[in-house]
């Protein structure tokens, strides 16, 4: 969903597992879907962890635990590895997450998140570990993600880190633009450049 992104302050959903791959984020059987509805993919985010084989909720999985809520997912190292399926980013966005924080992202998945208006925030392993500790101690712990300043702050401790983001993607997120919107917005500039460079 296209949304302008500026500063987000939210509680977090912790997923302290490393090497979460795209098949765990959205199982392969859902790639055959003929819909692009956000709710469909969001409802099936982490499907095989979230539900038992009979379809009943797995009460031990964090998304089924009312203790945790918010639009920030805090995940372990190497998030989004495996296949390049964009459906994984659709599922994350469709569930309502606007930010994913991890100490490392698979490159293709990171770009897929950006293309779907989800901000991947890469932090140090030490910052991530402290964040998990803060959330475990108090599930109401809030995190501030400031895209203009490119900072992430653990409000429980005051600790802050800077994160990197491609300048073009930052511009698009802050203005609610996808790649096509950006091209349309700059159509006159493109036409002028073509005329000047014939």
Image (spheres, rainbow, N blue to C red):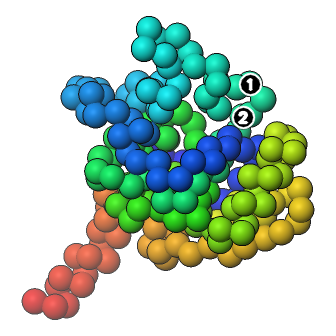
Q: Alpha-carbon neighbours of circle 1 within 10 Å: few (<14), some, or many (≥20)?
A: few
Q: Position of residue 44 (x, y in %)?
A: 44, 26
- What label sits on residue 66 in the rendered view? 1
Which residue is labeled 2 in the image?
69
Residue at 56% over, 75% down:
164
On screen, residue 107 versus residue 188, left or right, reads: right
For the residues bearing labels 1 and 2, Cβ distance under 8 angstroms: yes
Q: Considering the image in quadrants, where does the C terminus appear? A: bottom left
Quadrant location of residue 23?
top left
On screen, residue 7 versus residue 77, left or right, reads: right
Asked if 96 appears above or below 104 in the picture, the reply is above
Residue at 50% over, 19% down:
51
On screen, residue 126 versus residue 44, left or right, reads: right
Give how far apart the Cα atoms at labels 1 and 2 are. 7 Å
Disc 1 is placed on an element classified as loop
| Residue 177 shows in the view | no
Q: Alpha-carbon neighbours of circle 2 within 10 Å: few (<14), some, or many (≥20)?
A: some
Residue at 87% over, 45% down:
137
């Amino acid at each position: 969903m296209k949304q302008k992104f500026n500063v987000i302050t939210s509680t977090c959903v912790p997923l302290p597992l490393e090497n979460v791959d795209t098949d765990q984020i959205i199982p392969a059987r859902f790639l055959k879907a003929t819909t692009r509805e956000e709710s469909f993919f969001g409802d099936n985010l982490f499907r095989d962890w979230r539900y038992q084989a009979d379809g009943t909720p797995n009460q031990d999985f964090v998304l089924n635990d009312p203790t945790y809520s918010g639009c920030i997912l805090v995940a372990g190292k190497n998030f989004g590895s495996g296949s390049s399926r964009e459906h994984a980013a659709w599922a994350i966005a469709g569930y309502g997450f606007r930010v994913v924080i991890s100490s490392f992202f698979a490159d293709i998945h990171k770009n897929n998140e950006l293309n779907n208006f989800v901000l991947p925030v890469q932090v140090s392993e030490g910052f991530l570990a402290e964040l998990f500790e803060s959330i475990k101690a108090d599930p109401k712990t809030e995190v501030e993600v400031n895209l203009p300043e490119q900072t992430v702050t653990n409000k429980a401790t005051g600790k802050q880190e800077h994160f990197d983001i491609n300048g073009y993607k930052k511009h698009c997120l802050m203005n609610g633009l996808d790649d096509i919107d950006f091209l349309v917005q700059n159509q006159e500039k493109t036409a002028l450049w073509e005329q000047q460079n014939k």
